[in-house]
Image: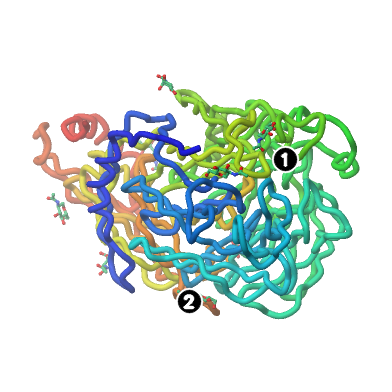
Amino acid sequence: MLQVFVFAPTSLVFLCFSLLTSGGRARGGYLNPRGQSPQTSFLNNFEVAGNSYASAQQVFLGTLDKVYIVDKTENNSWQINGHPAWASEWSISSRQTRVMDVITNSFCAGGTVLGNGTWLNVGGNQAVTYGGVAALSQTGGPPYDDPDGRQSALNFVRLLNPCDDGNCDWVLDQPMTTARWYPSLETLEDGSAIIIGGCRWGGYVNDALQDNPTYEFFPSRGQPVVSSILQNTLPANLYPLTWLLPSGKLFIQSNWKTVLLDYNQNVETPLADVPDAVRVYPASGGSVLLPMTPANNYTATIMFCGGSNILPAQWTEDWDIPHYPASTSCVQISPEVSSSYEEVDPLPEGRTMGNLILLPDGRILCLNGAKLGTAGYGVTTYTVGQSYADQPILSPVIYDPSAPAGSRWSRVGLNSSNIYRMYHSSATLLPDGSVFVAGSNPNPDVNTSAPYPTEYRIEIFYPSYYNQRRPEPQGLPNRVAYGGPFFNLSLTVADLFGNAHNIQSAKVVVLRTGFSTHTMNMGMRSVELDYSYLGNSNGSGVLYVSQLPPNPAIMPPGPALLFVVINGVPSVGVQVMVGSGSIGQQPTSPNEPLPQPSIIPQQQSEGPLNKSPGASVVLGQTNGNLTHWLKIAGALMVVLMVPSLH
Ligand SMILES: *[C@@H]1O[C@H](CO)[C@@H](O)[C@H](O)[C@H]1NC(C)=O
Ligand SMILES: *[C@@H]1O[C@H](CO)[C@@H](O)[C@H](O)[C@H]1NC(C)=O
Ligand SMILES: *[C@@H]1O[C@H](CO)[C@@H](O)[C@H](O)[C@H]1NC(C)=O
Ligand SMILES: *[C@@H]1O[C@H](CO)[C@@H](O)[C@H](O)[C@H]1NC(C)=O
Ligand SMILES: *[C@@H]1O[C@H](CO)[C@@H](O)[C@H](O)[C@H]1NC(C)=O
Ligand SMILES: *[C@@H]1O[C@H](CO)[C@@H](O)[C@H](O)[C@H]1NC(C)=O
Ligand SMILES: *[C@@H]1O[C@H](CO)[C@@H](O)[C@H](O)[C@H]1NC(C)=O
Ligand SMILES: *[C@@H]1O[C@H](CO)[C@@H](O)[C@H](O)[C@H]1NC(C)=O
């Protein structure tokens, strides 16, 4: 069962690239720009880039170079401590994989990153033997040595401090109050985590006898608290879809229902039912908190795409769910502006298990999943092998929220994968703006002969900007605070694509890639920093960049990536610590006012057309007519930028 794979030639380029990336996590200092991404011959396409050793049910980016993979306990052929490994670490630069020991059965855990940078993975299943069958010993022993990852007395949460030296591994910490299989996690504004829902034993859907309709916190705040929405949304209330909103309330979507939860008071306010389709597992629509920006006043808008139109009673009836067409519907809601959903452009085809991945340029990549059925596996006369889904969708599609309604989805120029990414597949953004895709295993144990086999191949998808020259901003901070002084990023003529006016449409993006499992990326969010600018007469420029707004609920504390996007092309992301770097109330202060934006007209004497005296007037948007100057300079600019374009 050993899988053979060949490293692509570009891995050498990645190796060189990694030398540029040793920026590290020094406190309160500045980071070096991360230079250029290597060129790929797989632009708009997928490249097989390694082997995950454990099937990638759960995935997250832990450092600038390391992706962590967590599987359920199963018979992977790679071993650790004398038993099959069900966790691993994959290096972006070397494309090599290292086995890890997650100790207990992490089957269908949830996860997030805490405000101090430690990753948390909680919940799971009982100890199993071959075929996913419950083991006689729940405390370890052959063949898997996988103590119960679920039962209250033993259900320790798992913690990982990601590392680049190959020496870190998972450790067990305090137990949770109660057993949780399929819990959702979200990082809160103090950097702690809320752990929501789940059931005690597992199954395709939940039922009243094993339901755990409660939430609790890590670090613990005591006994679990009952949640009405979880109680009222059986049987499809597993992995409830949850985001922290700027008000500090939590948005929770479960089965057809939606609420706002004030978790401090335990008060739930009902919002509208989600239209068209169930979005939570096992219908498994894609979901994403759209970028929060100064332009939208940091309003939270959550979009759901695909899933399946299945009524509560139908989940447990005997019918052909695995061949039921998935939904095309996309809807969005801005829960602090309106209590109802609105329809947005539908998917080009119905899709279940389609991940929605935030790209640094503000677009959203949809990939993985299938046209028919749902998530889950089991044995019925209808399942395909044991898969509850059929007809995998191999082609990605990209959503641009800034495009006019009716034309937001596009797959023009995008190639397809040839690897099925069904149930238990995952995806995450990487610092260079490419997307890591792995997993797929709708089987109770490793099965390489099933119609939808256990998948170990890792792929990288390269979005359209990938081969362009990347901006290399100087002055990148390694921390971002909630308010306080702005910081300055300098950009060269080349960074601005030969035209200082391109600085006006820059984006400075703080992006958390999240914890990917079951078509969710828990904690994934993207926030644009406010900025002003100075365009120099020689075509270079400076961005004056505000810290985050003084509200940690907009972007909870913890590690994140920082990108500067010029003309839709992101810099290679650096890792920043958002907030204080520790769990607890975060310091906030007002944002220092930004200087007026200004562009100093390009000095004619520097250009090839030396016909008029150089202008030295500084024009601010508020005190001058930029459009006027742009028109005058227009033809000249075109000529000036030609030599610096490649
Ligand atoms: C477990 O995997 C090993 C290969 O790694 C294989 O030899 C063995 O037969 C498998 N056991 C079962 C019960 O599938
Ligand atoms: C982060 O906080 C958690 C909870 O208190 C703790 O277990 C963990 O060790 C902390 N991590 C670091 C890096 O301090
Ligand atoms: C932006 O949001 C803040 C905080 O929610 C609010 O006070 C302010 O009125 C909003 N501004 C606009 C222009 O909507
Ligand atoms: C693999 O899956 C196929 C199809 O479901 C099944 O017939 C076969 O028994 C499975 N193999 C193992 C080792 O479970
Ligand atoms: C798409 O990928 C296939 C292989 O997966 C390749 O043969 C084909 O040339 C690619 N097409 C484009 C336009 O990149
Ligand atoms: C950033 O630029 C402003 C405006 O030119 C200047 O006053 C300030 O000193 C600069 N800050 C740093 C840290 O260089
Ligand atoms: C461009 O002008 C700025 C501001 O005067 C200056 O700091 C920078 O060094 C200049 N860059 C080049 C390449 O001359
Ligand atoms: C700015 O200049 C343009 C082009 O000359 C002109 O059409 C426009 O009306 C001016 N706008 C203002 C606000 O003066």
Query: How many residues crowd around disc 1 within 10 Å: few (fewer than 14), some, or many (20 or more)?
Result: many
Mark 2 residue type: Ser
Say what secondary structure mark 2 lies in: loop
Image location (x, y in percent) of residue 223: 75, 78
Which of the numbered marks, if any, corresponds to residue 582? Answer: 2
Contact (Cβ within 8 Å) of mark 1 with mark 2:
no
Residue 85 appears in the picture as rendered:
yes
Drawn side of residue 186 relative to residue 150, left or right: left
Q: Say which of marks 1 and 2 sits in front.
A: 1
Which of the numbered marks, if any, corresponds to residue 505? Answer: none
Image location (x, y in percent) of residue 639: 19, 29
Image location (x, y in percent) of residue 401: 55, 40
Which of the numbered marks, if any, corresponds to residue 377? Answer: 1
The tally of labels here is 2
Say what secondary structure mark 1 lies in: strand
Image location (x, y in percent) of residue 501: 30, 43
Q: Nearer the viewer, residue 297 or 435?
A: 435
The residue at 71%/80% (across/down) is 222
Drawn side of residue 534 relative to residue 183, left or right: left
Drawn side of residue 58 relative to residue 135, left or right: left
Q: Nearer the viewer, residue 315 or 256?
A: 315
